Amino acid sequence: MSVYVASTTAPVNIATLKYWGKRDKNLNLPTNSSISVTLAQQDLRTLTSVATSESFPEDKLWLNGKEESLQSERTQHCLQDLRDLRKQLEAADPSLPRFSQWKLRIVSENNFPTAAGLASSAAGFAALVVAIAKLYQLPQSYSDISKIARKGSGSACRSLFGGYVAWEMGSNPDGSDSKAVEIAPMEHWPQMKAAVLVACADKKDTPSTSGMQQTVATSDLFQERINVVVPKRFEEMKQAILNKDFALFAELTMKDSNSFHATCLDSFPPIFYMNDTSRKIVKLCHFINAFYGETIVAYTYDAGPNAVLYYLQENEEKLFAFIYKVFQNNQGWDSKFSAKELAKFS
Ligand code: 2P0
């Protein structure tokens, strides 16, 4: 009996305008729109292959070589939506094989260590959904397919695209307008670079889903964030990207990371994702920008302590001169350097 196969990769994405809060937990509908920047599509990615055959007795998944359950509600939601779309194609063309009724075998592999502390669920769900959409030869656009990935994990919808991506929150209760769209492709701003500084490789202590619920239910700051701060910032960040305005992009990115972590701290009980090393890196970035008299670096932190730094290629040496020196001689680093001490970094 024939076996049909399709493969794809999807990148890890890092939000520069954070998704934090759900208005619908089952559909993963967010309380604000968000933006991500994905620069190296193959550096941190999930590779997923899917196969289907009339002879397969059940759905199966292997993740990084280990068999895993497919029974989570989120995964089932994605598989059902994809099968429903395939069923529509089969209804319109009876000559098509009945993939919608056949079982799937899924093999998925990350090329980055889980211990790097980077969220893998976004890339994982994006790759899963796109691989099956390819196998089923679905005619829907990536934005439409992103709505299915969103049900797996909210941020997964942004991993269907590389480059500069917006997740538009939408307003429909059924989520039909809550989807990812491309702001600009990576080539739009090829000088942009990202670096990950691993501050701690441990698993985070508050999972994102429950952390968000806690923030929505208890933080006062959160209302200001979703109603006032983020809607304005969303438009400004899109413009900064389109205009390749690094100083503005960097300022908005840093402010949004700080705002997100402030609402975490304002949750009750509070949620701490950043650690002392994370905070040192924040201070260091502000210090570097002040030292050069221009904004050459931006930091952002997700639901964990690791920093992602954005900078332009032309400033790479300027930036890493500081980073290497400080972290090689970590003893006694302090934000209150004297002018003489500062000179060591130039
Ligand atoms: C983001 N994060 O925009 C934000 C910033 C973490 C901090 O999206 O419950 O794993 O699966 O929808 O997508 C992490 O949340 O949460 C996240 P679910 P998800 O990237």
Image: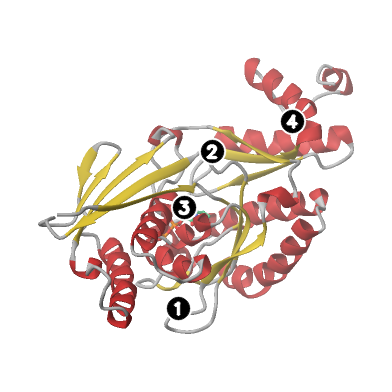
| Quadrant in which the N terminus is drawn | bottom left
State how far apart marks 3 and 2 are (Cα).
15 Å
Instruction: Say what amino acid the circle numbered 2 marks.
Output: Asn
Q: Which residue is mark 3?
A: 271
Q: Secondary structure at mark 1?
A: loop
Residue 125 lies, in percent from the top left, at: 38, 55
SS class, disc 3: loop
Who's the residue at 83% across and 22% down the image? Answer: 342
Is 106 positioned to the left or the right of 251 in the image? left
Query: At label 1, which amino acid type do we have?
Result: Gly
Q: Are marks 1 and 2 in contact (CB under 8 Å)?
A: no
Q: CA distance from mark 3 to mark 4?
A: 25 Å
What kind of element bears circle 2?
A: loop
Residue to which mark 1 is pinned: 175
Residue drawn at x 87%, y 41% as measured from the top left:
294
Q: Quadrant of the C terminus?
A: top right
Q: Give the number of the mark in front: 3 or 1.
A: 1
